[in-house]
Image (cartoon, rainbow, N blue to C red):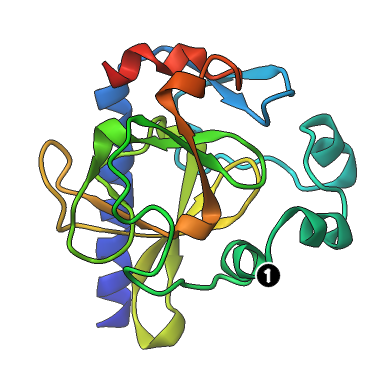
Amino acid sequence: QTFSRSRRLTSMLRQRTALLSTLLLTSTISVQCSSVCSLRPLSLFPSSFSLSISSSPSNMARCGLPQSDEELRKLLTPEQYRITKQNGTERPFKNAYWDNKKPGVYVCVISGDPLFSSKEKFDSGSGWPSFYAPLRPEAIVEKRDISHGMVRVEVRAAVSNSHLGHVFEDGPPPTGLRYCINSGSLRFVEKSKLEKEGLGEWSTHLD
């Protein structure tokens, strides 16, 4: 039974990756490591499913990421650190963005990489920010999670390798997915401030 469930989970992950890639219809993509890091062109296929960037000090330095746990703890609040690096979960309805309805982009709290947007956000009633798709499939990594006696699909940020939340198959069209994300793993950039933060390319996406 466990083996059968694992095979179904693997098949589901492959189908989801293909669906999200088709939705975005781009031949090349870029990962923005931070607001001051140069864009890194990457091929969309087939690496979108397993994309990750090495967390070695040299690569982290090039992307403007904290190079030590000490630096990371200075950057984050204790709650943000617990969520992103200890796979924590914040309280529902008691977090920053669960009811945020402003137009804008949600970036990784560590790297500044754009992950989700208000255009794909919906009210799931769960008490956590919920999205039916990421901005770019290569911005996230999905992993099998068997913690706490459950079989789930964990969502992590590709650039910073931060825990974001989980994805479930009970979302709205067009994907039928619900990316249930911790506010503590995100930073919200309002549409009016996208240009200033080097994210102006996403303004038209929100129209």
Instruction: Tell me the kind of residue under disc 1.
Output: Pro
Query: For the point 33% across and 56% down, which residue is it?
Result: 98
Q: Is residue 201 left or right of residue 176?
A: right
**Residue 186 x/y as whole percent:** 51, 48
Asked if residue 52 is positioned above or below residue 193 in the image, the reply reads below
**Residue 51 versus residue 103: which sits nearer the camera?**
103
**Residue 15 x/y as whole percent:** 25, 43
Question: Tag count in the figure?
Answer: 1
Q: Is residue 84 left or right of residue 64?
A: left
Asked if residue 90 is positioned above or below residue 98 in the image, the reply reads below
**Residue 165 x/y as whole percent:** 43, 61
Query: For the point 77% across and 32% down, which residue is it?
Result: 63
Asked if residue 191 is positioned above or below residue 16 in the image, the reply reads above
**Residue 101 versus residue 8: which sits nearer the camera?**
101
**Residue 94 versus residue 146: which sits nearer the camera?**
94
Categorize mark 1 by other alpha carbons within 10 Å: few (<14), some (14-19), many (20+).
few
As drawn, the residue found furthest toward the left would be: 173
Q: Is residue 185 left or right of residue 11?
A: right
Q: Point out the image quarter for the N terminus.
A: bottom left
**Residue 162 x/y as whole percent:** 60, 55
Q: Is residue 81 left or right of residue 49?
A: right
Indicate the secondary structure of the residue bearing disc 1: helix
Q: Which residue is label 1 attached to? A: 78
Query: For the point 65% across and 18% down, which residue is it?
Result: 39
**Residue 91 versus residue 39: which sits nearer the camera?**
91
Q: Point out the image quarter for the C terminus.
A: top left
